[in-house]
Image (cartoon, rainbow, N blue to C red):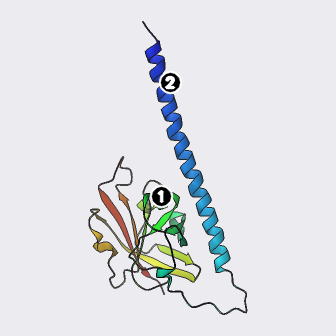
Amino acid sequence: MNRKPVLSVGSALILAGAAVLGEYWWNQRDAAQAQQRAKEWLKRASVRPAHQVPAPAPAVAHSIHRGDPVGELDIPRLHLSIIIFEGDDAHILKLGGGHIPGTALPPANGNIGIAAHRDTFFRPLRGIHQNDEITLRTPAGKLQYRVTQTEIVPPSDIHVLAPAPGRDLTLVTCYPFYYVGNAPQRFIVHARKAG
């Protein structure tokens, strides 16, 4: 029996596995570095001398660019804390959460849309409950929200991002959470401003 073909296939599989693990490690490293840099930016941007009057909330819609940090989203009960970047393309969602273009930008009024992957940053959303607290920190301040409802919709159902009374923050991720491949549905979390 000739063992050369078996060894060649085995070697190829080992190399392919190493390449996949290397890419995974590289993506994790990039995401961790981007999250850390953005957290440092948010900390610097949020610190003002005590005598300085807080600047009015900027009309940031025209001054923010794809990839810019927007803020930090925290859901304490789920131990979820991620930086949100402007944009919702594949590269942005590898680094953290993405502010969905066309939705309100914090701290403006309206429905703020934030997306992230179900198999990385938004995996804890599988355990979210009504009335869970959500905090969104931006350089303009801290915004508090309470979860009002969750729903599962097809990817084409974009009405969930439309402005509506009491719909101040919408989180979007793929569903089911443990689906292998491109998930057929979206898991939606709606929240209302608290206080």
Q: Which residue is mark 2?
A: 11
What residue is drawn where x is 36% and y is 58%? Answer: 174
Residue 5 location, x and y as percent? 43, 16
Q: Quadrant of residue 171?
A: bottom left
Q: How many marks?
A: 2
Q: Is residue 107 above or below residue 175?
A: below
Q: Amino acid at mark 1?
A: His
Instruction: Give whichever of 151, 180 is nearer the camera.
Output: 180
Q: Earlier in the sequence, mark 1 or mark 2?
A: 2
What residue is drawn where x is 56% and y is 57%? Answer: 31
Q: Residues within 10 Å of mark 2 (few under 14, many from 20)?
A: few
Residue 8 numbered mark, or none: none
Residue 163 location, x and y as percent? 34, 81
Residue 79 location, x and y as percent? 54, 63
What residue is drawn where x is 49% and y is 74%? Answer: 134
Q: CA distance from mark 1 to mark 2?
A: 31 Å
- Secondary structure of residue under mark 1: helix
- Secondary structure of residue under mark 2: helix
Residue 155 location, x and y as percent? 29, 62
Q: Residues within 10 Å of mark 1 (few under 14, many from 20)?
A: few
What residue is drawn where x is 52% and y is 46%? Answer: 24
Q: Quadrant of the N terminus?
A: top left
Q: Amino acid at mark 2?
A: Ser
Instruction: Give whichever of 75, 40 is nearer the camera.
Output: 40
Residue 91 numbered mark, or none: 1
Residue extending farthest to the top is 1
